[in-house]
Amino acid sequence: MELRHLTTFRTVAQLQSFRRAAEALGYVQGNVTAHIQALEQELDVQLFDRLGRHITLTSAGEQLLAYAEKLLTIAAEAQSALTQREVIKGTLTVSAPDTLCIYRLPALFSNFQQRFPQVRLLFRPLSWNALQKAVSEGVIDVAFLMAQPVQSRGLIAETLLPEPILLLAAPSHPLAQAAHIQPEDLETETLLLTEMCCSYRTVFEQQLAAEGCVPKMLLEFGSIEAIKQFAMLGMGIAVLPAVSVNAELAQSKLVILPWERDFRIITQMAWHKDKWLSPAFQAFISTAREVLKEV
């Protein structure tokens, strides 16, 4: 098996697309297809199920991906050990949920690319539920999560900064002037929430359940912007991270409701405990610590 074929295979598996893999690797799509076909012929297995425009790993492909990660990691370690390069190069696959993609990571990516322009960053947005699995399986190099502290023997998770979660409403909302908000105050309200896979929504609903609180109505959105617009129109109470509503609070379009319960949500980065930290990986982690811990 040629390392370049394994590199192509890993990239296709990560991006779930022959076209995007070709773009990431600087190949024409025919070369990517040829590399995968060469591996399949050599191993006498099918590595991907092709369902229209969508591809997924077969069971054989999943097995090979684990070995490919190990082989490519060893090759990268050998190259790093035997060559001395002043310029840091390489490719990193990074993932995070939408909230961090929008409000935290742009500053990090911009800073990193200015410092290390020859490191290629591949970004894959994933839901909170999918992130830990993707890191554990080596599909992505490093994940950023806004959640309760990650507890996993297979992962290294590093806290970057706390993320206050707020209950918010329009200034005209009846609860906007309340001195305290209790769970029973929410039973007659419409709550504007993110999707079920969102970590801070899960914590909030656990708090309500512990108090026996059942709100009148839950409206679920796939967009933070939509939640903010509904809340500003007085159509319910939003549950969102403080970082996502700085502008609306400064303009008095939303107000914070006094919900005096601790969410204990943090932004953290996580990677596999056995992952080799290449110079590019080390540079990225160091930059993340510097940029995000200063926020």
Image (cartoon, helix red, strand yellow):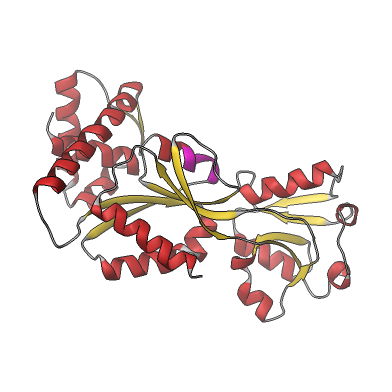
Left or right: where 166 falls relative to 124: right
From the image, which quarter does the N terminus lie in?
top left
Tell me if residue 131 is in the magenta stretch: yes
Relative side of 241 to 94, left or right: right
Residue at x 66% of width, y 80% of height: 250
Q: Is residue 99 or residue 142 the one in the foreground?
A: 142
Q: Residue at x 47, y 46 (%)?
A: 157
Residue 210, above or below 47 = below
Q: Quadrant of residue 164?
A: bottom right
Q: Position of residue 211 (x, y in %)?
A: 86, 45
Q: Residue furthest top?
A: 44
- As drawn, which residue projects farthest toward the bottom? 251
Q: Which residue: 30% across, 52% down? A: 281
Q: What stretch of residues is rendered in magenta?
A: 128-132
Compared to 104, does 269 lie above or below? above
Q: Position of residue 122 (x, y in %)?
A: 32, 53
Magenta-drawn stretch contains 33:
no
Of residue 180 and residue 42, the one placed in the foreground of this image is 180
| Viewer-closest of 205 and 226 | 205
Residue 20, given in percent of the width and then of the height, sits at: 29, 48
Q: In which quadrant of the rendered view does residue 172 lie?
A: bottom right
Say whether residue 228 is left or right of residue 178: left
Percent coordinates x, y for residue 69 in the rendering = 27, 35
